[in-house]
Image (spheres, rainbow, N blue to C red):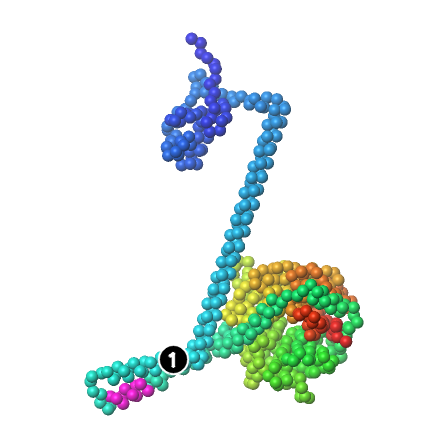
Amino acid sequence: MAQSNATQTFTCALTGLSPLTDPVVTPSGYVASRKLLLTKLSENGGVDPFDVAGTRRLDESTLVELATAAGGTAVAVPPRPPQATSLPSLLGMLQREFDAVLLELYDSRKALEETRRELSSALYQNDAAVRVVARVVRERDEARGRLEEFLAGDHGAAANAANAAAQRSEAAASSATSAAPVTEPQKRGREEEAMATEEEPDVPAKKAKTDEDESDLTKIPAAELSAMSSTWKKLSKGRKSIAKLKRSGEETANNEALLAKLAEGANEKKVNLGKSSAKAGVLCMTSLKSNDGTAEYTVTGGHDRTAIVYNVTSGQIVATLGGAGGDVTSVHGMVFDDGSGMMLVVTGSADGFARAYAVPLVGDDEPTPLGEAESNGGAPVNVTVHPSSSGVGDARILVASSDGTVELWKLSAEGLKLSTRLESKGEEEDGGGGSVKLSSGCMHPDGLIYISGTSDGQLIVWDLKTQAVAGTLKGHDGNPIDFIAISENGYHVATSSSNPANSPIHLWDLRKLKLAATIDPGDDVGRVSSLAFDPTATYLAYAGEESIKVCVAKDWDRVVCTLSLPKSVGGKKGKKKSGGESFGGGVVWGGKGLSVKEGEEGEVWLATGCDGQRPVRFWGIE
């Protein structure tokens, strides 16, 4: 009988393709490709893919191989599919494949978007959880602090005395109920023992702890921290009222018209301060106001190594404070409401010293130097009188130095005494911390947060209550942070860097510890040298080589006022002065302030000083 050359073809039960080059049949009677079936079994753990219940096991040894040709030696050549027998059919097949790929891509994108939404929700929940934990930790620390203050104060002593009295009462009751008679010597012995117990307070141990705390410069003494915390409670209430401040559209328009009027130049004034024989230039400036609000002052420092106290209201120089051995690069002060009529002024100079002066505002008395503090190997980059200070005999001064330290000095009748030294540690790429060089600093309006800027573009947020770093922010592409300003509501921090030219201003959200926005100052401002928020935290003023601009908080790109400066103020635009010298001398706000109530008329002025220029310029003062 002649042998047939017909080729037997099979269709795969898994893929539906035909013919098969390696067909096998399962015990359940299904024909499939051996290669594909083994791959499927390795994926599902050896379960028969054709079993509906998914419980039957299938092994390679149970598969029966099928011959695809007579004698089992011929290999079947897969025929061309019917839809691929002509060019139009091929094009149609390619079109269908392309459409299928597009649909699959659409489904993949849809799944990716859904995954992103789930990830965003998870991150939001994680952030909320972190905030709750941070709040709980803060409340725990506050409770611990109050407990320590309670135990360290008179209440703790009273509690100890009450406990000792209770113990003595129990001992007396126990003695009274004893049946055995007590002889006179025994009675005297017990009385002496009771008196010894009564006269044995915990004062020596407590005193030793106090001495240990005083010698530990990494911690703020309990008395100073208590005064700072009490001030924080008062100031935080005022800050919250500023945060809740709401204005109508008409009030906002009136305030912006008042600011725009400053640019008209009708009330522009120049005042020459400093020694005429010294190098011209104002390097730093701050503004102060008397307690009754009737007098306003500016304090400036510069190349002449002096600080000038100027009465803006009367137009007279109140005091000239000398003694510095280098350029005065930072000034700050406070007018006290203790009835003494005194102003405390603190200066930081390039010779590495911070100096304190008592300036009488009434009478003809001369200012008095109160003491000087030498920084730990660097020059002061910021000096601040802490708001908890109550007088020239009870003041706290923070000094941030270029060597990376933030020091708290106590000013008393004996002079300046170092209380605390906080070492700044930056973040490195390998995760470790290293010493940094500070380039700027600023105190939070509440008085318990201090923010310092570094020479490599980091912001270090110090929590003075715990003497620990609350956060570290990185920006300005690693360039030095030259100036820091914090809004009066405590929400926003503005920072600037003078290198490179036209470097953007960074706005940070202090609540979230992240960058919120940036401001491009533009060529008409140039290199930004100083920043200042207005007292209502509504506007931000930034000064540069060419002009001063005032923008709206949260709508940072909207400028409501531009004040032009002489072309010679900052030297050639874009060119940094040699030796790292500053070219700006600060910008400050003054006046009664912007209107905060309907029908109330605002009154505001701005002032700035510049390196290379002797006069201080005022806008809004007749």
Residue 616 shown left or right of residue 385 in the figure: right
Q: Which residue is mark 1?
A: 160
Vertical order, 194 against 419 (above or below)? below
Amino acid at pointer 1: Asn
Residue found at the far left of this picture: 180
Please say whether residue 192 is one of the residues in the magenta stretch: yes
Residue 315 shown left or right of residue 325 in the figure: right
Q: Position of residue 570 (x, y in %)?
A: 74, 68
Vertical order, 555 against 56 (above or below)? below
Residue found at the far top of this picture: 1
Which quadrant holds residue 328? bottom right
Residue located 69% across and 83% down the image? 319
Tell me if I can see residue 500 in this picture.
no
Vertical order, 200 against 61 (above or below)? below
Which quadrant holds residue 356? bottom right
Q: Position of residue 228 (x, y in %)?
A: 54, 75
Residue located 47% across and 24% down the image? 11
Which quadrant holds residue 448? bottom right
Q: How many marks?
A: 1
Query: Which span is picked out in magenta?
Result: 186-195
Residue 5 vs residue 308, the one in the foreground: 308
Please say whether residue 322 is one of the residues in the magenta stretch: no
Residue 253 vs residue 352, the one in the foreground: 253
Asked which secondary structure carries label 1, the reply is: helix
Q: Position of residue 130 (x, y in %)?
A: 50, 59
Residue located 61% across and 27% down the image? 92
Residue found at the far bottom of this picture: 184
Q: Position of residue 215 (x, y in %)?
A: 48, 77
